[in-house]
């Protein structure tokens, strides 16, 4: 649980400014993706979603934030809000599509309580947006590993 | 240059002429090439990972299970004899392919197992502290990790032939005379780099190894499908490759070993098939090659692989090679003209593999967006992480061509890349 950094000053990442999971919800993502019928629109949207995520300062790209099992590099920062109990998250990746997929995950899980995260039906969400193929372990993009890391952090706080 | 090579020169004035080699006829033998991906015709350029299989191989696999299935070398009945004959004929076919004798051809699960066999049996029984094993910077993990592990166990040291300073992917052969020395016991090098397609000058490396009496293994996984390999002419001690990269099924590999070495080596695995006589106290080993083939082998796979080798040997290999050279030249020419594209491993002596990066784009993003357009490539480190580290890159996008690819496939690759470039 080394990435839970309660109360620590992470000065250069403003977790609250990330609108995913608050201004952009899972329902928004499902609605928007259902609109598109060609790959260019779909991936254009996914990549744009990824741009909602601020790049990590180099100091935050540490081993304990690193998500293993990815062909691309992925880092997850997770902070527990002592006031309202919510988990605030940020993700960075050197690959645009992985960053976009991470944003899709955060649209569902960010700024939520551990209970809300534990109760959330990710499989249903992913099947609605037809992104299951990105989640097969063989894709090696680490989205599955990212989701289990977040769920693990949530479960530990139930 | 033989007549077939000359014939492959292309008339650039004609549209869509691939070469005199008839790739279209060849394509018709590969049913899977008719598949679509997301509704688009498939352009399969992941041939270094595995080649597709011609009808002859698929039929042989089905025919084996339909008509001949039985265990080999055992049953005193008709099917057992048919299965054994087909299984052993495949060994003869591979022996002929490599110019070896049949006792020197050992079936394994693939290149990986073949290298592990040599590292554990030969390396494990001969290496001592102070000994050195030499590999190269271009190795696949399959020809790194087994040596690393056997070195750790025996106290031997692993040494690595570095890349040239200009980083075009070629090995720095100037280091050979110091790297391969009187302490060197084993030299294990890749014949053709899977990540970059570069053909290593293995004959120079083998010649140097000979002067110090070192034993040589050549990892030929990416070589055998592209040019003839003669283990006698190469003068190597071990040669390894996988059936699935030579139009055959997965789960079958080949280890060629020099007879005298194989005779002297302890078994790799023990059990049925590989024994001569067993008591509870002791066992004696079967003769070559069976001494290294414990348990029931992948009989159907071996039989189908025999069909693959016969199919392959019946092709006009010179024309095939010329066609591949044309595809590489055509792809390289387009790559050089493509804005922001950097060829990784831009060396003169290559098989038909184009490894590259697009400026500012992660290789995985490029691969995903090519896939959406029906173009299958491999992206990432290609199981050569130390090579990627040495080149200072996270990975590459790799288009690896087979004889059934065409100039049209190359055009579709670059049309798709153009979309990716505008996209990212
Ligand atoms: C050069 C090289 N060596 C070894 C291997 C491992 O082969 P296999 O996975 O079939 O055992 C490969 C396969 O990618 C390869 O390209």
Image (tube, coloured by chain):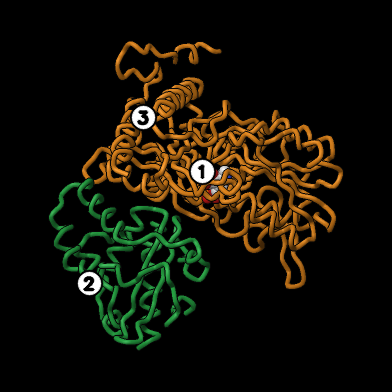
Chain colours: A green, B orange
Residue A58 coordinates in the image, percent (x, y): 49, 61
Instruction: Give how far apart the Cα atoms at labels 2 and 3 are.
Output: 45 Å
Report which residue position mark 2 lands on.
A22
Please give the chain letter of the residue carrying mark 2: A
Q: Quick check: do tags 1 and 2 share a chain?
A: no
What element does badge 2 sit on? loop
Residue B1 coordinates in the image, percent (x, y): 56, 13
Q: Quadrant of the C terminus of chain B?
A: top left
Q: Is residue B176 above or below residue A7?
A: above
Q: Residue at x 22, y 46 (%)?
A: A40
Residue B410 badge: 3
Does residue A3 appear to the left or right of B62 in the view shown?
right
Q: Residue at x 18, y 57 (%)?
A: A33
Assess disc 1: are there few (<14), some (14-19) or many (≥20) residues with their C-alpha within 10 Å of its C-alpha.
Answer: many
Report which residue position mark 1 lands on.
B243
Q: Nearer the viewer, mark 1 or mark 2?
A: 2
């Amino acid at each position: 649980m080394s990435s839970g950094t309660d109360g620590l000053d992470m000065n250069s990442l403003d977790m609250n400014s990330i609108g995913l999971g608050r201004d952009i919800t899972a329902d928004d993502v499902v609605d928007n993706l259902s609109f598109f019928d060609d790959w260019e629109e779909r991936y254009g949207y996914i990549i744009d979603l990824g741009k909602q995520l601020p790049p990590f300062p180099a100091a935050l790209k540490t081993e304990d934030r690193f998500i293993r099992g990815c062909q691309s590099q992925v880092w997850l920062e997770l902070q527990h809000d002592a006031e309202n109990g919510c988990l605030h998250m940020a993700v960075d990746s050197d690959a645009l599509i992985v960053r976009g997929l991470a944003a899709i995950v955060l649209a569902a899980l960010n700024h939520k309580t551990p209970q809300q995260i534990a109760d959330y039906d990710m499989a249903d969400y992913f099947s609605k947006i037809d992104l299951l193929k990105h989640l097969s372990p063989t894709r090696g993009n680490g989205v599955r590993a990212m989701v289990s890391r977040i769920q693990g952090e949530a479960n530990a706080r139930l | 240059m033989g007549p077939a090579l000359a014939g492959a020169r292309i008339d650039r004035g004609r549209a869509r002429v691939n070469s005199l080699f008839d790739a279209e006829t060849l394509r018709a033998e590969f049913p899977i090439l008719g598949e679509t991906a997301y509704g688009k015709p498939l352009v399969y350029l992941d041939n270094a990972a595995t080649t597709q299989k011609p009808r002859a191989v698929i039929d042989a696999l089905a025919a084996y299970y339909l008509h001949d299935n039985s265990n080999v070398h055992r049953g005193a009945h008709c099917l057992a004899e048919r299965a054994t004959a087909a299984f052993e004929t495949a060994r003869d076919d591979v022996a002929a392919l490599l110019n070896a004798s049949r006792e020197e051809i050992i079936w394994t699960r693939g290149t990986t197992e073949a290298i592990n066999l040599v590292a554990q049996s030969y390396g494990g029984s001969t290496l001592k502290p102070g000994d050195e094993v030499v590999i190269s910077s271009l190795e696949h993990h399959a020809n790194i990790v087994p040596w690393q592990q056997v070195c750790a166990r025996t106290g031997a040291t692993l040494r690595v032939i570095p890349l040239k300073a200009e980083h075009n992917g070629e090995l720095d052969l100037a280091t050979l005379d110091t790297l391969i020395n009187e302490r060197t016991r084993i030299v294990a090098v890749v014949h053709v780099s899977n990540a970059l397609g570069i053909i290593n000058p293995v004959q120079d490396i083998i010649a140097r190894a000979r002067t110090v009496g070192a034993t040589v293994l050549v990892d030929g996984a990416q070589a055998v499908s592209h040019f003839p390999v003669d283990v006698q002419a190469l003068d190597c001690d071990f040669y390894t490759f996988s059936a699935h990269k030579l139009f055959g099924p997965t789960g079958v590999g080949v280890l060629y070993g020099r007879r005298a070495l194989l005779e002297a080596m302890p078994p790799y695995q023990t059990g049925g098939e590989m024994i001569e006589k067993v008591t509870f106290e002791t066992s004696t080993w079967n003769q070559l090659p069976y001494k290294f083939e414990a348990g029931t082998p992948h009989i159907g796979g071996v039989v189908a692989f025999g069909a693959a080798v016969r199919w392959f040997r019946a092709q006009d290999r010179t024309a095939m090679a010329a066609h591949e050279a044309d595809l590489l030249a055509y792809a390289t020419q387009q790559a050089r003209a493509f804005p922001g594209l950097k060829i990784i491993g831009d060396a003169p002596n290559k098989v038909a593999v184009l490894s590259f990066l697009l400026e500012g784009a992660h290789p995985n993003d490029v691969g995903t967006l090519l896939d959406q357009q029906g173009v299958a490539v491999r992206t990432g480190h290609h199981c050569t992480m130390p090579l990627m580290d040495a080149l200072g890159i996270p990975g590459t996008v790799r288009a690896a061509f087979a004889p059934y690819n065409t100039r049209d496939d190359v055009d579709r690759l670059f049309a798709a890349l153009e979309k990716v470039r505008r996209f990212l």
